[in-house]
Amino acid sequence: MIRLDAGSADFEARFSALVNGRREADHNVSADVASILADVRENGDAAVKALTARFDGFDLDAVGWQIPLDTCRAALEDLAPELRQALDLAASRIRSYHEAQRPQDSDTTDAAGVRMGARWRAVDAAGIYVPGGRAAYPSSVLMNAIPAKVAGVERLVMVTPSPDGDINPLVLAAAALSGVDEVWRIGGAQAVAALAYGTKSIAPVDVVTGPGNAWVAEAKRQLYGVVGIDMVAGPSEILVVADAGNDPDWIAADLLSQAEHDPTSQSILITDDSGFADRVSAAVERKLGTLATRDVARESWETHGAIIIVRDLDDSPPLVDRLAPEHLELAVADPEPLFARVRHAGSIFLGRHTPEAIGDYVGGPNHVLPTGRRARFSSGLSVLDFMKRTSFLACDDAAIRVIGPAAVALAKAEGLPAHADSVSERLA
């Protein structure tokens, strides 16, 4: 963990190094992923089967390619009541939030008599990737599947790696609750390729969303254009802006909530109180001593963690914007002034009683968010990722006579006589 002081002469150089540091996996995965994609495109099911045996250690033909939807529904029914209630609450809140995102069609006629507008339609089929390696994430099922169904996607396909053929029942229960139509026992770059290209067994989709490891992220990047994607996601991030009015144990827990995801995750604290920074650092150490995920969390904290001391928290928004974090907590008594000034963050959590972890499960907004400073130009997963807009235009004889001559003039100026002719013919 590094500690920076905004008043130090070397602060700018050290902060720039923090901002520009790369935390993606060390593996040079691009060539490996390209080979996997080419294999699946050329050999379809045979490639998917061979790659699953190689990476996940089981025979798809023997264990089964698909999980029957009846199995998913049974997993939902078998949940303990408390867990079922929690899953239902999460699903309900996520659905309500995303229903408010549905865009409205437009249809207007302007002063020239030209009718114009746009209509929104869902893609025909979408694929969601649900991680299954380090941990099982039913919350990721809800966050990806529910927006797709709210958008109106008719065929929703879930792929998830299942080492040794096993899938967490809670993931299957979440699939049933959120309306997934197909569940396939495959993962990795080969699963993304199967969704994009299609195989004899798996029909192709139009959009692929969801988090995954470096190979999954690289597969999505290489396949963009064959299919739509939500984003190329990297390691998790949290930035907490906190004053000394907080309980240091709370802030330490918030920092570790992302550190425990992966050794390449990053947790950063910005505070205006050096003593509070010391107390948080000590609390992190205490919690790491008892945390079940301490090995991963410690590596993340010690390798990528940071504490930044500023003169005043009013100085923090420019630093926040340069980091453009995936998750930003504004743990202060009145977060509104800072909130108003922050421009770049994937999702913002306001006040002392809004830990980022509440957003991972039951808050409502989506937890699939841009990482690696991509919040400067991209947004979290939404209903719009599963929809596309088609514009339309209608001119009658009077309308084209009003705007047509300008089109003819511009077409001639661009040296495109057929364009000009297609309009001028209607003006004769």
Image (spheres, rainbow, N blue to C red):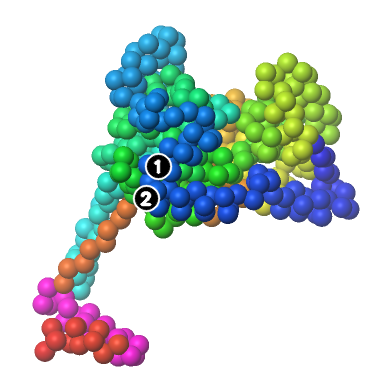
Q: Is residue 205 left or right of residue 267?
A: left
Name the quarter where the C terminus is drawn. bottom left
Q: Is residue 399 above or below residue 100?
A: below
Q: Is residue 195 above or below residue 161?
A: below
| Residue range highlighted in magenta | 396-415
Magenta stretch: includes residue 357: no
Name the residue tied to disc 1.
Answer: 46
The x, y position of residue 157, in whole percent, is: 34, 37
Which badge, 2 or 1, is on the more N-terminal residue? 1
Q: Is residue 305 left or right of residue 102?
A: right
Name the residue tied to disc 2.
Answer: 197
Q: Residue at x 61, y 38 (%)?
A: 236
Q: Is residue 175 visible?
A: no
The x, y position of residue 288, in whole percent, is: 75, 22
In front of the other: label 2 or label 1?
1
The x, y position of residue 298, in whole percent, is: 75, 28
| Mark 2 crowd level (few <14, some 14–19, many ≥20, 10 Å Cα) | many
Secondary structure category for the residue under label 1: helix
On the image, which quarter does residue 66 sit in?
A: top left
